[in-house]
Image (spheres, coloured by chain):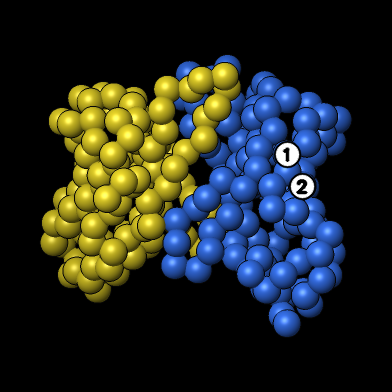
Chain colours: A yellow, B blue
């Protein structure tokens, strides 16, 4: 499928378990992002990546790990899930800016519940 | 640091009513400004944008004007439809910064009743 996809769309896990959320984009965009969406907070950036093998922390990185071995994939791992990580997670991507265009394209989201 | 403040929701309107969602920002520089929309069960989509002062972004009947003097980017639509029911996010990006990441407001839920 063309575009940006996330899997799974829904996940329920237990406290302490490791969970990996997948993100895949078909545009060969250099930049990819992970956000979490919580009521009253809007979207907060967890991690981002400017290119394969280049990642950096965002606003709320604690408890999360990312990797980017291939341009098209950007998995997000919760090493030991906590209830506070219950949220909706969005992946996004964008190309290198052209003419000041920094538009990001978002995936459909993964709703994660930690019990 | 950079921040975006949106009017608190939820906002409930009747079809064909006039819509305003207020957005103000704080930035150490000259940001580009965006409105994103999130329909139920979906990811965010860019609705409109403005990259410099006095620019007006417009799309699908929505408009917003970049006001540097009031640091605002209010979203307006003259006649809303039921299909406009969604969550609207104001956002900024600071082109001169090293990170060049979007900073979002907390979102405003809009419900339009028939």
Which residue is depicted at the point 27% across and 50% down?
A1
Relative image position of residue B29 (x, y in whole percent): 67, 21
Marked residue nearer the N-terminal end (1 or 2): 1
Q: Residue at x 20, y 25 (%)?
A: A53
Query: In the image shown, does B47 or B88 lie closer to the viewer?
Result: B47
Residue highlighted by disc 1: B57
Q: Is residue B75 above or below residue B17?
A: above
Left or right: B35, with A1 as reference point: right
Q: Are marks 1 and 2 in contact (CB under 8 Å)?
A: yes
- Left/right of residue A16 with respect to residue B97 in the rendered view: left
Q: Nearer the viewer, residue A78 or B41?
A: B41
Quarter of the image where one finds residue A100: top right
Circle on res. B63: 2
- Mark pair 1, 2: CA separation: 6 Å
- Where residue B76 appears, as percent x and y from the top left, is 79, 53
Left/right placement of residue A59 relative to residue A73 reads: right
Count the labels in the image: 2
Q: Nearer the viewer, residue A77 or A85?
A: A77
């Amino acid at each position: 499928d063309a575009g940006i996809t996330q899997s799974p769309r829904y996940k329920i896990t237990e406290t302490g378990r490791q969970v990996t959320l997948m993100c895949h984009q078909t545009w060969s965009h250099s930049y990819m992002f992970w956000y979490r969406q919580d009521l009253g907070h809007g979207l907060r950036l967890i991690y981002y990546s400017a290119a394969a093998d280049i990642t950096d922390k965002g606003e709320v990185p604690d408890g999360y790990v990312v990797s980017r071995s291939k341009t098209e994939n950007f998995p997000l791992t919760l090493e030991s899930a906590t209830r506070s990580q219950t949220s909706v997670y969005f992946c996004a991507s964008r190309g290198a800016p052209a003419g000041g265009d920094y538009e990001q394209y978002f995936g459909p989201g993964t709703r994660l519940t930690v019990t | 640091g950079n921040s975006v403040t949106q009017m608190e929701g939820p906002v409930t309107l009747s079809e064909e009513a006039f819509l305003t969602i207020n957005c103000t920002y704080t930035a150490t520089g000259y940001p580009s400004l965006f409105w994103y929309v999130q329909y139920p069960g979906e990811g965010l989509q860019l609705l409109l944008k403005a990259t410099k002062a006095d620019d007006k972004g417009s799309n699908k009947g929505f408009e917003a004007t970049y006001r540097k003097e009031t640091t605002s980017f209010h979203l307006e639509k003259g006649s809303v439809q039921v299909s406009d029911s969604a969550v609207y996010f104001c956002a900024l990006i600071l082109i001169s910064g090293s990170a060049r990441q979007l900073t979002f407001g907390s979102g405003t839920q809009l419900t339009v009743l028939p």
